[in-house]
């Protein structure tokens, strides 16, 4: 279990560093499929794994190359701090099947938009 968790973290970190996606897009399905977690536990565990220090080295590499805006990143983080809290409170009142469907629909919509836009 420890080895699998480290391997999943490594793979998600590599993919996130390459394409800049939030690790939760990959962590949540992995936690459901590979670790047998329900949607609530997978989402909570994913958020725990993504606490501030995790992306610091990837961010610094982008920043050193002039490919990150620190001011906007901090503003996004502040908004995420507040929005994440209220989103988590609200999620506790949604049936798991609907939470999973909302997650999947979000991935489809974002992926479709990215795929079909110039």
Image (cartoon, rainbow, N blue to C red):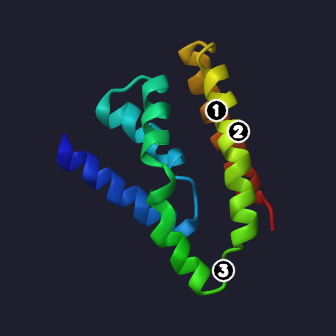
CA separation in Å, label 2 and label 1:
5 Å
Q: Name the residue nearer the viewer: 116 or 32.
A: 32
Name the residue rendered at 60%, 87% in the picture. 65
Tag 3 residue: 67
Classed neighbour count for the residue bearing mark 3: other residues with Cα under 10 Å, few (<14), some (14–19), many (≥20): few
Mark on residue 82? 2
Image position of 81 (left or right of 19): right
Looking at the rendering, which quadrant does residue 74 occupy?
Answer: bottom right
Nearer the camera: disc 2 or disc 3: 2
- The answer to whether marks 2 and 3 mark residues whose Cβ atoms lie closer than 8 Å is no
Q: Is residue 118 left or right of residue 103?
A: right
Residue lying furthest bottom in this view?
A: 65
Q: Is residue 65 left or right of residue 69?
A: left
Residue 99 quadrant: top right
User: Mark 1 falls on what kind of element?
Assistant: helix
Label 2 packing within 10 angstroms: few (<14), some (14-19), many (20+): few
Q: CA distance from mark 2 to mark 3?
A: 26 Å
Distance from Cα at disc 3 to Cα at disc 1 = 28 Å
Residue 96: horizontal and vertical position, in percent? 54, 16
Asked which secondary structure carries label 2, the reply is helix
Q: Would you name the residue on which mark 1 appears?
A: 85
């Amino acid at each position: 279990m420890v080895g699998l968790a480290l391997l999943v973290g490594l793979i998600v970190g590599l993919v996130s560093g390459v394409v800049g996606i939030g690790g939760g897009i990959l962590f949540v399905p992995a936690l459901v499929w590979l670790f047998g977690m329900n949607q609530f536990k997978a989402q909570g565990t994913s958020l725990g794994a993504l606490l501030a220090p995790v992306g610091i080295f990837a961010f610094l590499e982008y920043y050193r190359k002039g490919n990150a805006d620190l001011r906007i990143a901090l503003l996004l983080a502040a908004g995420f701090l507040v929005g994440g809290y209220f989103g988590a409170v609200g999620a506790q009142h949604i049936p798991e099947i609907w939470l999973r469907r909302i997650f999947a629909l979000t991935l489809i919509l974002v992926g479709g938009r990215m795929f079909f836009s110039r």
